[in-house]
Image (spheres, rainbow, N blue to C red):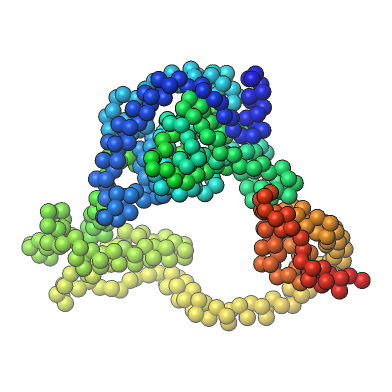
């Protein structure tokens, strides 16, 4: 097939299935390499209890939030492993040549409107590993559109290369052809395509070793359930135009970085330093707690990390943050550091009466008045609203009386729109649901004509438009009871 035909087919459907383009020796080298990476990476992952679901399981938590730049769990039992980053982390230097893969796929740059592999970039080289027993995914796209107003050519694509022959029980990847056009504004465009009978049926290619599946980054797809007794490994190349940078699919932190628990301890020490500096000579971390030394005593205080001290500290932090937000709302130019020093450390110690710090706060008169008035206004909000309405009632109604000349024209225009929608709803409920009700939220016709509630209209239109082709075609038939109501309303 010519290059132009390949590009046209890819542009229309959003995917290509090319058979037997990667030699078996190349597949075998990548399979051996990924087997080593997976074994070592999971051994390293199981040391990080902070990202596992519980202390009694070795299952990773789902999502980028709990993942690393080396590995992310996309859905239960379905991992994506960044092979380049994992190789660096684990110090594995046996990754096969990418140039050899590129030579097997000379047609890929043209799908990105590029002349050669030198004009594009490989964003990720990853392994998608669907474990035995993993459930099917939800429909999703791997990325968005760069222009939400107009459809643009493909700027990023995925290349799936199976490392074993796929069967239906291994959970192949299912695609929705043509949906790379719809994900720009998914709900209304999908509904319109369904109503116009242009929505294509899903496909799930059973790739064999040596095949490649190339699809647009914006295309709807999902991994099907792996009901077999073995894992399903897929080598993935994410290729994009030179200017594009994918920041959505892997987080920045590494598996070798400090754990979240250690990081939280560092944060506590930072807050201790910032909040208590005014009344401390110093503090330091010990193996059995945090040692604190105050100005008024030479004896240091040793506090356990899990003690009431830190609980009170966190309460004080919340109080100070709320106070800061209030001051910012009132637009007062008060130095927050001064307030922190005034609050001091009295919540965390048992000072002598003579050493108790003053809790008085000296404010300018205009600031105090502003706070008093704001508090009074908050307590008497209803009274202020009624007073404002009484004061401005005459002006409001005078303005309304002067500006009602346009109402008659608007009423006529709205009536014509209603009649137009009514005819569309009677002749083609499917098109009315897709183009008017669900796409724009204008569902008044069915509410008024057939005495349906808004929720009933939405439910009816959703079933009407989103019903698949193999479902009962009477989904869009309006119940006879509604037509009976319509006849009563008709002249």
Horizontally, residue 290 falls left or right of residue 112, namely left
x then y, percent, for residue 289: 14, 58
Q: How many marks?
A: 0
| Residue 267 can be seen, yes or no | no
Residue 107 horizontal/vertical position (percent)? 56, 21
Q: Name the residue rendered at 74%, 58% in the picture.
A: 474
Residue 92 located left or right of residue 146? left
Horizontal relation, residue 450 to residue 249: left or right: right
Residue 389 image point, x, y percent:
66, 78
Task: Residue at 24% x, 54% y: name it.
Answer: 265
Q: Tell me which corner region of the image, top left, top right, bottom left or bottom right, holds residue 477.
A: bottom right
Q: Nearer the viewer, residue 169 or 319?
A: 169
Residue at position x 25%, y 67% in the image = 312
Seen from the viewer's position, the closer of residues 282 and 222 is 222
Q: Position of residue 234 (x, y in %)?
A: 44, 34
Q: Residue furthest right?
A: 491
* 376 shown above or below 421: below
Which of the two residues, 323 or 307, is positioned nearer the viewer here? 307
Question: Is 224 located above or below residue 158 in the figure?
Answer: below
- In terms of image quadrants, where is residue 306? bottom left
Residue at point 18% right, 69% down? 349
* Residue 338 in view here: yes
Residue 403 found in image quarter? bottom right
- Which residue of the protein is positioned furthest toward the left in this rendering? 299
On-image quarter of the C terminus = bottom right
Whether residue 383 is situated above or below residue 179 in the rendered picture: below
Quadrant (top left, top right, bottom left, bottom right) of the N terminus: top right
User: In the shown orientation, is residue 7 left or right of residue 326?
Assistant: right
């Amino acid at each position: 097939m010519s290059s132009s035909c390949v590009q046209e087919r890819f542009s229309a459907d959003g995917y290509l299935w090319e058979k037997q383009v990667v030699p078996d020796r190349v597949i075998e080298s990548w399979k051996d390499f990924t087997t080593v990476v997976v074994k070592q990476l999971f051994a390293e992952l199981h040391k990080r209890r902070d990202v596992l679901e519980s202390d009694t399981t070795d299952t990773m938590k789902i999502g980028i939030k709990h993942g690393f730049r080396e590995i992310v769990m996309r859905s239960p039992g379905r991992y994506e492993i960044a092979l380049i980053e994992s190789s660096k982390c684990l110090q594995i230097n046996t990754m096969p040549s990418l140039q050899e893969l590129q030579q097997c796929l000379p047609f890929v740059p043209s799908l990105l409107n590029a002349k050669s592999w030198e004009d594009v970039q490989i964003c990720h080289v990853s392994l998608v590993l669907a474990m035995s027993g993993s459930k099917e995914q939800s429909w999703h796209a791997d990325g968005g559109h760069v222009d939400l107003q107009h459809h643009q050519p493909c700027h990023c694509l995925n290349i799936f290369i199976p490392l074993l022959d796929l069967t239906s029980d291994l959970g192949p990847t299912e695609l929705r052809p043509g949906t790379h056009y719809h994900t720009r504004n998914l709900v209304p465009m999908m509904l319109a395509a369904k109503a116009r009978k242009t929505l294509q049926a899903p496909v799930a290619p059973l790739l064999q070793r040596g095949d490649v599946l190339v699809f647009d980054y914006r295309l709807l797809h999902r991994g099907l359930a792996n009901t077999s007794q073995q894992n399903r490994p897929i080598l993935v190349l994410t290729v994009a135009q030179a200017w594009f940078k994918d920041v959505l699919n892997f987080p920045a932190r590494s598996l070798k970085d400090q754990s979240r628990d250690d990081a939280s301890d560092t944060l506590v020490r930072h807050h201790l330093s910032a909040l208590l500096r005014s009344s401390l000579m110093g503090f330091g971390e010990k193996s059995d707690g945090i040692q604190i030394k105050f100005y008024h005593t030479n004896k240091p205080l040793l506090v356990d990390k899990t003690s009431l001290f830190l609980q009170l500290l966190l309460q004080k932090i919340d109080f100070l943050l709320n106070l800061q937000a209030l001051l910012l709302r009132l637009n007062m130019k008060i130095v927050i550091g001064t307030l922190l020093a005034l609050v001091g450390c009295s919540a965390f110690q048992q000072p002598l009466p003579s050493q108790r710090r003053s809790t008085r706060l000296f404010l300018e008169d205009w600031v105090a008045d502003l706070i008093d008035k704001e508090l009074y206004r908050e307590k008497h909000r209803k009274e202020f609203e009624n007073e404002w309405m009484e004061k401005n009632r005459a002006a409001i109604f005078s303005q309304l009386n002067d500006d009602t000349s346009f109402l008659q024209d608007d009423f006529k225009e709205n009536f014509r729109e209603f009649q137009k929608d009514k005819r569309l709803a009677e002749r083609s409920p499917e098109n009315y649901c897709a183009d008017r009700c669900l796409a724009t939220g204008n569902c008044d016709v069915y509410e008024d004509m057939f005495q349906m509630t808004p929720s009933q209209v939405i439910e009816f239109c959703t079933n009407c438009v989103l019903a698949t082709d193999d479902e009962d075609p009477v989904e869009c038939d309006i119940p006879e009871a509604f037509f009976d109501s319509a006849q009563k309303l008709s002249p």
